[in-house]
Amino acid sequence: MHTDWERCVRAVQSKDARFDGWFFTAVVTTRIYCRPSCPVVPPKPENMTFYPSAAACQQAGFRACKRCRPDTSPGSPEWNQRADLVARAMRLIADGIVDREGVPGLATRLGYSTRQVERQLLAELGAGPLALARAQRAQTARLLIETTPLPMAEIAFAAGFSSIRTFNDTVREVFALSPSELRTRVPASRGAQGTPGVLALRLPFRAPLNPDNLFGHLAATAVPGMEEWRDGAYRRTLRLPYGHGIVSLTPEPDHIACRLTLSDLRDLPVAISRCRRMLDLDADPVAVDEQLRTDPVLAPLVDKAPGRRVPRTVDEAEFAIRAVLGQQVSTAAARTHAARLVTAHGEQIDDAEGGLTHLFPSPEALAALDPQSLAMPRTRRTTFTTLVTQLADGTLHLGVESDWTETRARLLSLPGFGPWTVDVIAMRALGDPDAFLPTDLGIRRAAQELGLPSTPAALTARASGWAPWRAYAVQYLWATDSHPINFLPV
């Protein structure tokens, strides 16, 4: 979008928050870059130039605005609605792969050469993978500076910087303030406080956001021991690259309140990225709802409760395993099966609030089980053991970088994997915004009630007009039922 100069100027002059994260405004006279909704008086159009990423702004020598804090904008929805090389690379960079494995590791996971990955990112985003990772490190550093009392040296290494000097230079260059000056600017009411070791953050999103089906689904399917709904918040354990964590997510009118406890602070950017992905916070609800409103059957559902998101996951492999456990059984039965696995084979952790006890078992741990110990029908046992074995040995990989088409084909080749299982994994684990579930019982009931075709083939044909947002249409159709997944828990 940043190449459409007139459209960008209109968005800046109207301070339209819907475009935050889509592009960034750089002011050539002040050398400052802002989000489109910056509250200051808009600059003259001839002084504006536009970039597709914060990293590109920083690389061009602009520093972040101190008023609108563009580094904290919601992420571009482009990366969650596409499955091409650039989108998959951006999801991996947000997951911290460049900091852990370098640019060669990023390229290996994508199946391309380092040079090709760098060339495509530079062409579309104006910055290469190192610059994009550097911008993410700067944002993580700012979060830690403003929300914790940690010494600057600890913050530097937790944010992923290789030295304190690099940390200091980057913070000064990006924010035009030293780390100490950043900390002193934080009001006492917003500074580090509360429970020691707990990070309190605000996760922004594009309005509107309807929390009912989002948190209702996560709470209704919560596995005891690793997930719970408590005091208006969804809590769960996280398996992370350097350790583990516990997150508490509370829906607020203009943000999601996030409280994180991490065993290793280096996991902060990854934990934030995975929570945002689970709650689908980088979606563009206006674009989604406008498309779905073109169908006269869906329009009343959208108007009644706009801004529905697709509840996703923090761990793709975990979700695939849980999808198999949930085949042809009720939500309660699926929770029971998963809870048994978690209690028997998950890693134990400590929770200061006492409700969470385990991480979900790793594929390696589950692959080592005696299949006869699994309390499920023989055919599903075969499906389960085949899946965890392939996940454990790397034959099948499910991650943010997965190619949706290729992964669907791989899943369909596994015994016991039919269209419903593959589509629900594509929708909630892989993040395909156009995944559709025409064979789902709840969808077929909704279709019959609304006068839509009820057979899978006819319903799929009817739903072609909802593309590329059929996964969101699924949420609106599900919401016609009284199932607990559609309601925010009391």
Image (cartoon, rainbow, N blue to C red):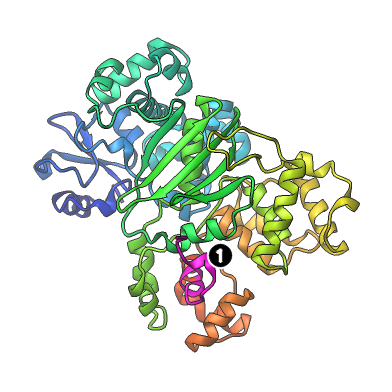
Q: In the image, is residue 59 above or below residue 460?
A: above
Is residue 368 shown left or right of residue 205?
A: right
Q: In the image, is residue 216 above or below residue 65?
A: below
The number of numbered badges drawn on the structure is 1
**Which amino acid does the dot numbered 1 rest on?**
Ala
Residue at coordinates 45% horizontally, 73% vertically from top-left?
466
Residue that sits furthest to the bottom in the current view: 451
Taking depth in this image into account, of 146 and 436 the one nearest to the observer is: 146
Is residue 337 shown left or right of residue 469?
A: right
Q: Position of residue 115 (x, y in %)?
A: 53, 32
The magenta region covers 474-490
Taking depth in this image into account, of 63 and 331 the one nearest to the observer is: 331
Residue at coordinates 52% horizontally, 30% vertically from top-left?
262
Q: Position of residue 395 (x, y in %)?
A: 76, 45
Q: Position of residue 3 (x, y in %)?
A: 28, 48
Residue 118, can we see it?
Answer: no
Is residue 436 shown left or right of residue 363?
A: left
Residue at coordinates 70% horizontally, 51% vertically from top-left?
339
Q: Secondary structure at mark 1?
A: loop
Q: In the image, is residue 68 above or below residue 285?
A: above
Residue at coordinates 62% horizontally, 76% vertically from top-left?
441
Q: Position of residue 248 (x, y in %)?
A: 47, 43
Q: In the image, is residue 359 above or below residue 228?
A: above
Q: Quadrant of residue 18?
A: bottom left
Quarter of the picture holding the C terminus: bottom left
Does the magenta segment cover residue 110?
no
Question: Mark 1, residues whose alpha carbon is within 10 Å: few (<14), some, or many (≥20)?
Answer: many
Q: Which residue is mark 1?
A: 435
Residue 196, can we see it?
Answer: yes
Taking depth in this image into account, of 54 and 298 the one nearest to the observer is: 298
Taking depth in this image into account, of 165 and 85 the one nearest to the observer is: 165
